[in-house]
Image (tube, grey):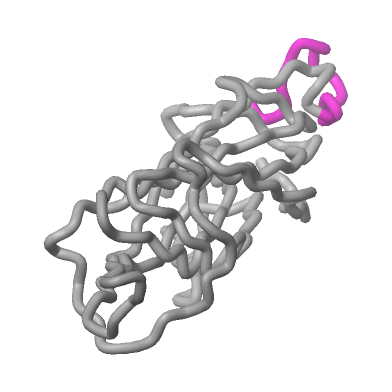
């Protein structure tokens, strides 16, 4: 069985909404100076939430990204927020003949990424005030010809979305940020799985000749 064609897909548009507590200001610019790690402060909270539990090929999809600043006295500077949506085929190498992946790719042998939509920086230099949150929504349309989520003994099709936040805490003293008030944060990553179901009518795939109309091509 040949792997599904790798579709080319981009995010159609991106919108933001302020969260609880007003969210904070817009672009605040980068802050330079002597830095230390934010080991004495709680980590920000990064949450992903899909608009549905199950999708079908060709469906519109909206993912809400929520960022919370749990501190009471520090502003959170979002230096960069990335977003990625992936579809992966995993083959059991004991049953399938697979090639060794290039060292430039992080995927393992038997893995094939057939859907990879990456936006390295959805936003940058945004402020989330102490004790508040911000929400960002990413919207796109799934390709019309992709296999369903499937976990078999020798083959699997998996989908997930992932977001990575890079930033720092800024502690205000007398209304200003001093060089010593910058606290670097370790990258924060969150991912959630996506479930895709299909019917023959909606999967956009052609049945092979000689097979009954109820047979799925990728099963």
> Which residue sits furthest front?
174
The residue nearer to you, when weighing 110 against 42, is 42
Q: Which span is picked out in magenta?
A: 204-219
Residue 217 shown in magenta: yes
The residue nearer to you, when weighing 129 against 150, is 129
Q: Is residue 99 above or below residue 218?
A: below
Q: How many labels does the image show?
A: 0
Q: Position of residue 58 (x, y in %)?
A: 79, 32
- Is residue 109 in sight in this rendering? no
The residue nearer to you, when weighing 2 against 105, is 105
Residue 115 shown in magenta: no
Q: Position of residue 92 (x, y in %)?
A: 43, 43
Q: In this view, does 202 lie above or below 117?
A: above
Q: In this view, does 50 lie above or below 175?
A: above
For the point 20% across and 66% down, the residue is 38
For the point 30% across and 68% down, the residue is 172
Image quadrant in which you'd find residue 169: bottom left
């Amino acid at each position: 069985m040949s792997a599904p064609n790798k579709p080319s897909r981009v995010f159609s548009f991106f919108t933001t909404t302020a969260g609880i507590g007003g969210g904070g200001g817009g672009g605040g610019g980068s802050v330079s100076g002597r830095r230390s790690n934010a080991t004495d402060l709680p980590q920000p909270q990064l949450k992903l939430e899909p608009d549905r539990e199950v999708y079908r090929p060709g469906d519109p999809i909206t993912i809400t990204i929520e960022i919370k600043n749990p501190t009471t006295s520090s502003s959170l500077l979002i230096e960069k927020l990335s977003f990625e949506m992936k579809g992966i085929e995993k083959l059991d190498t004991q049953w399938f003949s697979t090639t060794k992946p290039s060292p430039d790719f992080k995927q393992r042998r038997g893995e094939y990424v057939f859907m990879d939509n990456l936006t390295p920086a959805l936003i940058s230099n945004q402020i989330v005030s102490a004790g508040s949150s911000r929400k960002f929504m990413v919207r796109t349309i799934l390709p019309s010809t992709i296999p369903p989520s499937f976990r078999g003994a020798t083959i699997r099709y998996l989908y997930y979305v992932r977001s990575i936040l890079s930033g720092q805490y800024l502690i205000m003293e007398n209304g200003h940020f001093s060089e010593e008030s910058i606290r670097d944060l370790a990258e924060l990553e969150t991912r959630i799985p996506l479930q895709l179901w299909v019917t023959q009518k909606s999967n956009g795939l052609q049945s092979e000749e000689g097979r009954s109309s109820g047979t799925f091509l990728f099963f």
